[in-house]
């Protein structure tokens, strides 16, 4: 009996273990099947939430985005185009409008043969805008409404109004127009300074006349300048699709706040290629305020010529690793000169903010109200110095023989002492130094932008008066393998660091 019980007990235990293993395997198998399903559901739910966020933004923002139709008289024939307003028109308007929608920038454009003059004809162009006040103020691009003879605005609900221009600023490509209406939907303006690269953004406008089109993307870059689009540039770059007709419309974040005004695209096809540019809304706000008050923009002015502090220049000035911008020239009698700013100073802080990029600094100064006092910190001979400057108002804006030439092969230039005859010929009256008569192709001088007719005023921070002083200064720098030159081309003065 005991032996039978023991056997039965063993069999029971064995069966239990087998059952346990089977259950465990079954549970694991079920888990393998269930986890992907749960992950899939979680992923789909996340996508649904993202889609709902975009839908919510579109619903909240679209009523305050407007379609703008502009009529003007030009000397080119119109291109037929179907307009949401009815009738036909040219979506590109004039050459300047066309440039912002896909043609190469001016310095890349191939020259065209002049065409015989044509009679003036009515041309219709279009763009976008967004309402910023309940009583009808609308922000858009200057290149959309500038020089317009007639501006019509169409709202999402179908109402059409005639608009008047309040003010335009071609230098930043911002314009303000107004329609006679009340209780209009308004967009909330955000803070473009806190915008980060990688954030989701949404562009809303009327590409190709397709009213209230929404496209989404990310912020690809910030602080884009030197693009040749406007005089004052600090663009937000985005990959949200922007096409003809989007210009002047808002670029918004996921909260539905405007962080930029869509302005231009870079394209070789005339359409979207993944690179679009928007004016930061903080810059637009400053321009808008002035256009409302004055109808134009009054810009701040220091009276200096500045240049980027490249690694080579920083090394020459003994400022390795430091950031800032270099003062190449200080205008006589300017606010900068009165404040004590000197040629060769490196500006590292302005208005309590660090200075790192030339374009951003220029924009910052230009938006300051004339007459305001600001603190400006510079490095002079490597030591910090704080100055107080009163912002001014921006004003309405191969050599011939005669002296022996001397050549320096390592630099790749030939120079002569600046005589009175040469000074009169090249516009350097009252200056001293040596003038460049020849530049060797491919030399370090040519790569630095030095050309025939350039005036060299200083070598290693020391004024030179003739070829002998120039030669002596160059020989003294030979052991360093580099030389710092202060040069002048026409009215532009800048520092150049050459390594040889």
Image: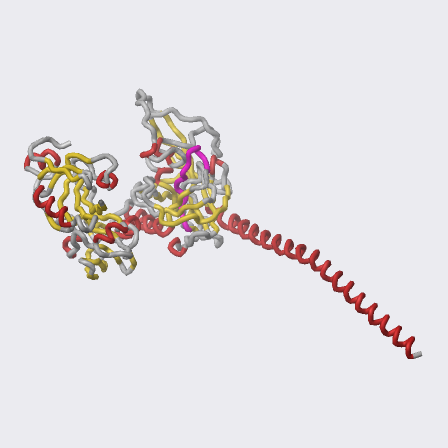
Q: Which quadrant does the N terminus fall into?
A: bottom right
Say if 91 sits above or below 203 in the image. above
Give residue 346's position: percent from left, percent from top.
Answer: 22, 55
Residue in view at x 42 percent, y 36 percent: 267
Q: How many marks?
A: 0
Give residue 426's position: percent from left, percent from top.
Answer: 12, 35
Membership of 313 in magenta stretch? no
Q: Nearer the viewer, residue 237 or 481?
A: 481
Q: How is the image coloured?
A: secondary structure
Residue 183 in view (yes/no): no
Say if 342 sits above or below 77 in the image. below
Give residue 281's position: percent from left, percent from top.
Answer: 38, 50
Q: Which quadrant does the C terminus fall into?
A: top left
Say if 139 sits above or below 376 in the image. above
The stretch of residues the image draws in magenta is: 259-272
Indicate left or right for 314 with 206 as reference. Answer: left
Indicate left or right for 266 with 457 as reference. Answer: right
Q: Nearer the viewer, residue 68 or 283?
A: 283
Membership of 270 in magenta stretch? yes
Q: Quadrant of residue 408?
A: top left
Q: Nearer the viewer, residue 471 or 149?
A: 471
Q: Nearer the viewer, residue 338 or 87?
A: 338
């Amino acid at each position: 009996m005991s032996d039978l019980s023991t056997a039965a007990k063993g069999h029971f235990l064995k069966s239990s273990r087998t059952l346990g293993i089977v259950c465990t395997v079954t549970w694991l198998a079920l888990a393998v099947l269930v986890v992907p399903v749960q992950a899939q559901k979680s992923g789909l739910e996340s996508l649904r939430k993202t889609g709902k966020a975009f839908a919510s933004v579109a619903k909240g923002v679209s009523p305050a985005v407007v379609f703008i139709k502009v009529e003007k008289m030009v000397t080119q024939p119109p291109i037929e185009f179907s307009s949401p307003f009815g009738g036909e028109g040219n979506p590109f308007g004039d050459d300047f409008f066309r440039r912002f929608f896909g043609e190469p920038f001016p310095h890349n454009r191939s020259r065209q043969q002049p065409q015989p003059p044509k009679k003036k004809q009515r041309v219709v162009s279009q763009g976008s805008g967004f309402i910023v006040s309940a009583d009808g103020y609308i922000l858009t691009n200057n290149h959309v409404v500038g020089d317009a003879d007639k501006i019509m605005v169409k709202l999402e609900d179908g109402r059409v109004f005639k608009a008047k221009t309040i003010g335009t600023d071609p230098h930043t490509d911002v314009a303000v127009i107004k329609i006679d209406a009340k209780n209009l939907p308004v967009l909330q303006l955000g803070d473009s300074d806190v915008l980060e690269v990688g954030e989701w953004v949404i562009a809303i406008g009327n590409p190709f006349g397709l009213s209230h089109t929404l496209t989404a993307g990310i912020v690809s870059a910030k602080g884009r300048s030197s693009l040749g689009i406007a005089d004052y540039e600090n663009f937000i770059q985005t990959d949200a699709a922007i096409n003809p007709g989007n210009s002047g419309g808002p670029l918004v974040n996921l909260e539905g706040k405007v962080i930029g005004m869509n302005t231009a695209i870079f394209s070789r096809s005339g359409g979207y290629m993944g690179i679009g540019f928007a004016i930061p809304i903080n810059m637009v706000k400053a321009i808008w305020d002035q256009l409302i008050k004055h109808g134009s923009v009054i810009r701040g002015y220091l009276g200096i010529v500045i240049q980027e502090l490249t690694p080579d220049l920083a090394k020459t000035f003994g400022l390795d690793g430091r950031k800032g911008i270099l003062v190449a020239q200080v205008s006589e009698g300017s606010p900068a000169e009165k404040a004590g700013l000197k040629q060769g100073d490196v500006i590292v802080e302005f208005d309590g903010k660090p200075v790192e990029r030339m374009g951003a600094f220029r924009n910052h100064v230009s938006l300051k109200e004339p007459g305001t006092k600001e603190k400006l910190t510079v490095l002079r001979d490597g030591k910090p110095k704080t100055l107080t400057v009163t912002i001014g108002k921006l004003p309405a804006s191969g050599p011939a023989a005669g002296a022996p030439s001397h050549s320096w092969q390592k630099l790749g230039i030939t120079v002569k002492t600046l005589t009175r005859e040469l000074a009169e010929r090249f516009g350097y009256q009252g200056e001293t130094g040596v003038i460049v008569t020849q530049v060797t192709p491919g030399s370090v001088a040519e790569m630095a932008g030095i050309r025939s007719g350039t005036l060299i005023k200083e070598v290693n921070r020391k004024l030179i008066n003739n070829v002998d002083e120039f030669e002596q200064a160059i020989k003294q720098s030979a052991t360093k393998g580099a030389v710092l030159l202060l040069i002048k081309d026409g009215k532009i003065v800048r520092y150049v660091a050459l390594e040889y």
